Image: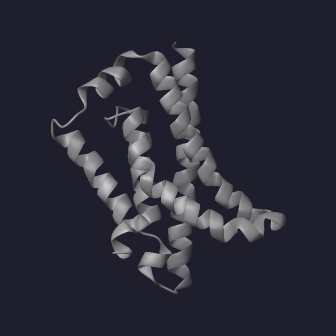
Amino acid sequence: MKHLFSFLNIGIFLFVLYIVQYFLPVKWQWLYELQEHNQMYKRWSGLAVFLLIVFQWVLTLSRVWKRFWKYSVTLTKIHKWIGAFSPILFYIHVMEFGYGYLALLSYLFFANMLLGVINLDIIKSKKNWVFQTWMITHVAFSVIITFVSLFHIGVVFYYE
């Protein structure tokens, strides 16, 4: 039962739910209307998603700054669980992938989330090239997601 509620299973399950609701007409109409027509809701829910993205960088900071090393194991667990549950927050913000750079942002967000839940603990490879490839890809996606998110925020507030 313990493995049933792992961040891997929960992350994959929530991702599949997001994909299913996207391709099938399974939408909460009241939430969809809120997302489409309420600017304040879109901004606050977007802030929540952006704060999730920013918080995920805390793990990196804990590994870079020596005085925070003692927190890195705990932050790694939190990082994994937040990543696994991130499709819920994404769904609350938007039910669709969007177009153009928003589609890119959505695809990278979910690809990085999947890459995070299918991490080195799951892969169980001790090979250095596997670790380096996984880490470089995960961090590169995170950097791109952060910059595209900042661009998106700029566009949202510029064209209000």
- In the orientation shown, which residue stands out farthest toward the left? 24
Asked which quadrant contains residue 139, the reply is bottom right
x and y percentages locating residue 101 in the rendered image: 43, 34
Residue at the image position 32 percent from the left and 53 percent from the top: 15
Whether residue 103 can be seen here: no
Tell me: 45 left or right of 73: left
Q: How many marks?
A: 0
- In the orientation shown, which residue stands out farthest toward the front? 1
- In the orientation shown, which residue stands out farthest toward the bottom? 126
**Image position of 2 with respect to 144: above or below:** below
**Image position of 12 with respect to 159: above or below:** below
- In the orientation shown, which residue stands out farthest toward the right? 67
x and y percentages locating residue 153 in the rendered image: 56, 28
In this orientation, which residue lies closer to the viewer: 72 or 145? 72
Asked which quadrant contains residue 9, the reply is bottom left
Residue at the image position 45 percent from the left and 83 percent from the top: 124
**Image position of 34 with respect to 21: above or below:** above
Asked which quadrant contains residue 34, the reply is top left
Tell me: 68 left or right of 138: right
In this orientation, which residue lies closer to the viewer: 149 or 52? 52
Q: What colouring method underlies this structural image?
A: one colour
Whether residue 109 can be seen here: yes
**Image position of 52 with respect to 10: above or below:** above
x and y percentages locating residue 17 in the rendered image: 26, 50
x and y percentages locating residue 83 in the rendered image: 48, 55
Residue at the image position 51 percent from the left and 24 percent from the top: 43
Tell me: 50 left or right of 26: right
Question: Quarter of the image containing the N terminus?
Answer: bottom left
In this orientation, which residue lies closer to the viewer: 118 or 128? 118
